[in-house]
Image (cartoon, rainbow, N blue to C red):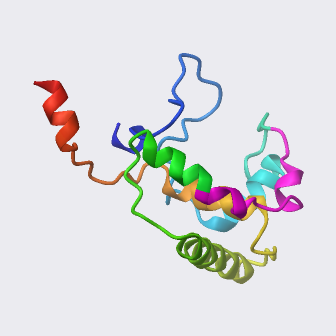
Amino acid sequence: MGESIYDHPFQWGSKRIGPDLAREGGKYPNSWHFFHMRDPRQVSPGSTMPDFEWLYTDKTDIAALPNKIAVQRKVGVPYPPMTEEDIDKSCATQENMIVDDLKKAGAEIPPDREIVALISYLQKLGKSERVTPSRAIKTAAK
């Protein structure tokens, strides 16, 4: 699957518990994820998924992103070159879009919380980008 080609470490295992999240992106609105993570049974009666209360109080560690992205680029993830300011701006844009959408649904949260970052991640799952093999990969395959 194209959407997991750059997962490091590779995330697939042989045991599945619960629904497959591989194509979760866009399946539910941001507010569904917000309420589901706080109290899964509110949205999915009978769910055995635990609550994730800390996602609403813990802040996202944006400061670590430049180093994390640099490491990902070294192992082949094709992130474009970005300055710390570019990364901060991209995060702020995504955070504000999600927070504004949540507010319209009656769910208010500061933009720097882990739940906002998780919603952003979940909304990308299954929305793969077209991958063009690099010249090095083509050469190595010959």
The answer to whether 6 is drawn above or below residue 60 in the figure is above
Q: Magenta includes 55?
A: yes
**Which quadrant of the figure contains the C terminus?**
top left
x%, y% of residue 22? Answer: 49, 41
x%, y% of residue 85? Answer: 58, 76
Q: Nearer the viewer, residue 129 or 31?
A: 129
**Going by the image, does 26 lie left or right of 58?**
left
Picture quadrant where residue 1 is located: top left
Q: Nearer the viewer, residue 42 or 2?
A: 2
x%, y% of residue 105? Answer: 71, 77
The answer to whether 41 is drawn above or below residue 26 in the figure is above
Q: Count of labels shown?
A: 0
Q: Residue at x 59, y 70 (%)?
A: 84
Q: Residue at x 85, y 61 (%)?
A: 56
Q: Nearer the viewer, residue 113 or 69?
A: 69
Q: Residue at x 42, y 41 (%)?
A: 6
The answer to whether 111 is drawn above or below residue 18 in the figure is below
x%, y% of residue 32? Answer: 68, 61
| Magenta segment boundaries in residue numbering | 50-66
**Going by the image, does 23 lie left or right of 28?**
left
